[in-house]
Amino acid sequence: MSSLLPDVIALTLLLAITAYSTAGGVDFGAGIWDLQAGNSPRGREARALIDHAMAPVWEVNNVWLVLSIVLCWTAFPSLFQAVFASLYPLFTLALLGLVLRGAFFAFRHIADDPRAHRTADLVFGLSSLITPFFFAATLGAIASGHVGTTGPSGSVVEASFNPMSIAFGCVSVAATAFSGASFLVGDARRYGAVNLVDYFRRRVAVAALVLVVVGTMALAVIRIEAPDTFRSMLAGPGLPFALVTMVLTPAVAVLVWRRAYSWYRVLTVGAIGSLVLAWGFGQSPYLLPGRLTIGQAIAPPATQAVLLVIAVVLVAVVVPAMGLLYYLDQRGALESPEA
Amino acid sequence: MFFMVWLAGESALLPSRIQMAFTLAAHVLIVPLGVALPALTLLMEGIGLARKDPVAIKIARRWSVVMAVQFAVGAVTGTILSFEFGILWPRLMGRFGAALGLGFAIEGIAFFLEAIFIGIYLYGWTRLRPRTHFLLGLALPPTGVLGAVSVLSANSFMNTPGGVTVDAGRVVDVNVMAALFTRALGYEFWHFIIAIYMTTGFVVASVYAVAWLRGRRDRYQQLAFAVPFTLAAALTPVQLLVGDLSARALVQDQPAKFAAIEITWTTRDHNPEVIGGLLDDAGQIHLGISIPALDSLLVGYTPSAVVPGLTSFPAGDRPSVVEANISHLAFDVMVGLGTAGALLAAWYFWILLRRRRLPESVWFYRVAALAGVGCYVAVESGWVTTEVGRQPWIVYGLLRVADAVTTAPASFVWTMLATLVVVYAAIACFFVILLLGLAARWRREDRLHPEAPEEGVPYGPRPETWARS
C-alpha cells in the first residue's frame, strides 16, 4: 500500500494535467478557429458561435491548471524546482498567453468600437494559439532529458527550445484545433446552426489529418532525441495510450464526416487524453527521464496521505459538483427557445 | 544570439521582489470582494425570499454579477501568482513544498468548488426555483472561507514555520497538523476574515452612499446601503480588538517584526509608542508623535514591560531600517484607518439606535463614500506590514528571500515585470469599464424595464437569443 501511494499521487497529477489538456484544449482550439475564421460573413457567424459556446464555463477549465501546479509543488517539490528553474522562459510565455487570452476574451464583450473589437479578436486568437504550444513545449522539454535535478543540464535556452519541445508544441496546437472543432460541431448542432455544422465538420477532418501527420513527425523527433522514451511509448506502458490516440483520431473524423453524431465527443476526449497519458506512462517511472523517479521526488509520507485525501475529495465532491454545472448548463440550453 | 545576451545578466532579486509585491498588491485588492461578496449577496437574497421583496432580489441579482466579474479577475491574478512561485522563487517550493504546498493544495479544491458554484449561482437565477437557487448558493461562503484559510495557512507557515523536520536543507518529515496550523494562523485568520467582510461591506455601501449624495433616496438605495454598511460597521470594533491581539502575539512569535512595526531600536522597558516618524541608521527617530511608555503599557499592561528592539537581532537577520520604516508607517496607516472606521460605525449606530432611522447628514454619506477606499488602503497596509516586517526571510528563520530567488537573469525578470504592468493596467481598465458599464446599464434599466442583469459576463448564462451578426 505505502509503496503504491507515490504512484497513485503521480497518477493524480498526470490526470489533472490530462483534464486540463482535454477541457482546456477544447477552449484553446475554439480560440484557434476564432483566429482562422476571418472577417467574412461566414467567419463572423463562426466567431459568434465560438463566443456563445465558451462563455459560461471557461474559468472552470482553468482551475485544472492551478490544481496541476499545486499538486506538483506539494507532491514533488524537487521536480517543481527543477522544471521551473530550467524552463522558466516557456512558462512565462505560456502564462502571458493565458492572461492575454482571458483579458481579451472579456474585453471583446465590452468593446463597442469595431476596430478595438478586431484587435481584441486578434489577440484572443493568437494567445489561444501560443498558450497550448508553450505549455506542451514544457512537457516536451522534460521528455527531452534537458531538465536536470537542480536546473537545466545545459543552458536554459537549450533546455527550453529544442526539437522535442517544439515538436510537442506543434502536436498540442494540432490536437487542440482538432478537439475544438469537434466540440464546435456539437455546439453548432445544439443551436441549430446548420451551415456551421458543415463548416466545423470540414475542419474536424482537416485537423485530424494534420494531427496524424504532425504526430507521426513528432514520433520521429522523439525517436532521434529521446530513444528511451520512444521505446517506452511504443513498446512499454505508453503503448496502449499511443494506440488509442492513433485509432480514435481518424475514427472521430470518419464519424463526423459521415454525420454519425453519437460518441464523437467522447472519443475526441479519449484521443486527446490518451495522447497526454502516452507521454506520462511513456516516461514512467521517471519524472525526469534518466534522472529523477517518482520514488525519489515524492514528498514525505504524511504529505502523501493528505494528497490522497485531496484526490479522494476531488473525485467525491468536485466531480459531482462539476457534473451538476454541466447538467444545468445543458438543460438550460435545451430549454432555450431556439433548441 | 540577441536572446542569449538578453538571458545573461545579474541577480534577479530586486526585480523579483518588485514583481511579487506588484502582483500580490493587485491580487489583495481583488480578494476581499471575491471571498465575501457571495455572503452579502446571499444575505440580500435571503431577505428578499423571506420578505418576498423583489427589490432585495434585484439587488442580490446585480451583486452576483459583480461577484462573478471579481472572481474572474481574481482567478487570473491568482493563476499568475501560482506561476510566480515557480518562475521567481523555485527554491521556496523546492525546499518547503511538501509542507507549504499543503495549504495551496486544499485551496485548489476550494477554488474548484467556488468556480463551479459561482457558475451555477449566476446561471440559476431564472432557471432554478428560488429556494433551490438560494440553497445551492449557500455553498459559496464556506468555500470562500476555506480558500482563504488555506492560503492564510501557507502565509502563516512563512511567518511562524512549524511541523517540518529539515535535514541537510531538505524536508524529510512533515507533521501535517503542525504545518497547516502554525501559531500565526489563529490571529491571521480572524484578522483577515473580518477585514475582508468589513471591506466588502464598506466598499459595496460606499457605492450607494454616492448614489444617496447624487439624490437617489428610494428603497433600493436604502436597502443596498443599509445591509452591507450595518454588517461592516458591526465588525469594525471587533476588528480593533482582534488586530490588537494579533500585534500583541507578534511580541512572542515574531519579535523582529514587532520591533520594526514599533521602530524600537533597542530592547527596553518604558518604551514609547511612536505615531508616524522615521527611524535612521543610528537608531534615532525623527518627526512623529512619541507617547511615553505607551508601547510597553500596550504590550504588558505596565510601563515597565520590556519590548524587543531591532538591535537584539543580528543585522543580517532583521528588517533593514528602510524596511522597518515601511512596515511601521503601513501599520500606523492601518490602525489610523481602523480607528476612523470605528468612529464612523459609532456615528451610524448612534443615529440608527437613537432615532430608529438611517443617517440623513450629507457629511455622514461623504465619509461613508470614502470608507470603501479607506478599507482597500487599510488591507494593503496590513499586508505590507506583515510581509515587509518578515524581511529578510521568506520562511522566518529557515530560508532567506535571497536564497529562494530564481537563477534567471535580472533582465528576464525586468522584462516580465514590465509586460505584467502593461497587462495589469489593461485588466484594470477592462474591469473598471465593465463595472461602470454595468452600473450605467442598471440605472437605465431602472428607468425603463427590468431585464436579466447577468448576461454577457464571464460565468453568465448564454443569452436566450443568439444574435447572428
Image (cartoon, rainbow, N blue to C red):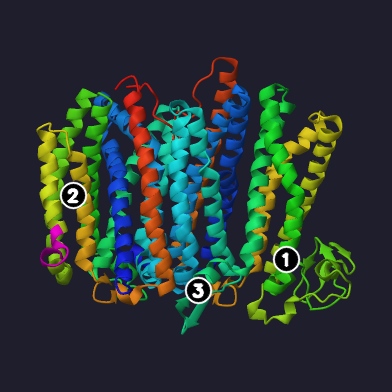
Viewer-nearest residue: A224 or B252: B252
Percent x, y of residue B93: 45, 69
At label 1, counting other C-alpha atoms closer than 10 Å, the crowd grade (few under 14, some 14-19, many 20 or more) is many
The type of residue carrying mark 1 is Asn
Where residue B453 is drawn, which disc sits there?
A: none
Tell me which amino acid carries mark 3.
Answer: Asn
Question: Magenta stretch containing residue A237, yes or no?
Answer: yes
* Tags 1 and 3 on a common chain: yes
Instruction: Report the magenta stretch's main SS.
Output: helix
Determine which residue is flagged by label 2: A271
- Choose mark 2 or mark 3, whichever is in front: 3
Q: Kindly state the secondary structure of the residue where label 3 is placed.
A: loop
Read off the residue under disc 1: B325
The chain that hosts pointer 3 is: B
Quarter assignment of residue B206: top right
The residue lying toward the viewer, choosing from B327 and B250, is B250
Residue at numbered disc 3:
B175
Q: Is residue A267 above or below residue A189?
A: below
Q: Examine the rendered structure and indicate whether residue B42 appears above or below residue B56.
A: below
Q: Is residue B462 magenta?
A: no
Magenta span covers which residues? A233-240
Work out whether residue A184 or residue B289 is closer to the camera in this orientation and state it. A184
> Helix, strand, or loop for circle 2?
helix
**Tag in front: 1 or 2:** 2
Instruction: Check disc 2 and give the amino acid type.
Output: Ala
Q: Is residue B270 left or right of residue B58?
A: right
Callout 2: 10 Å neighbours few (<14), some, many (20+)? many
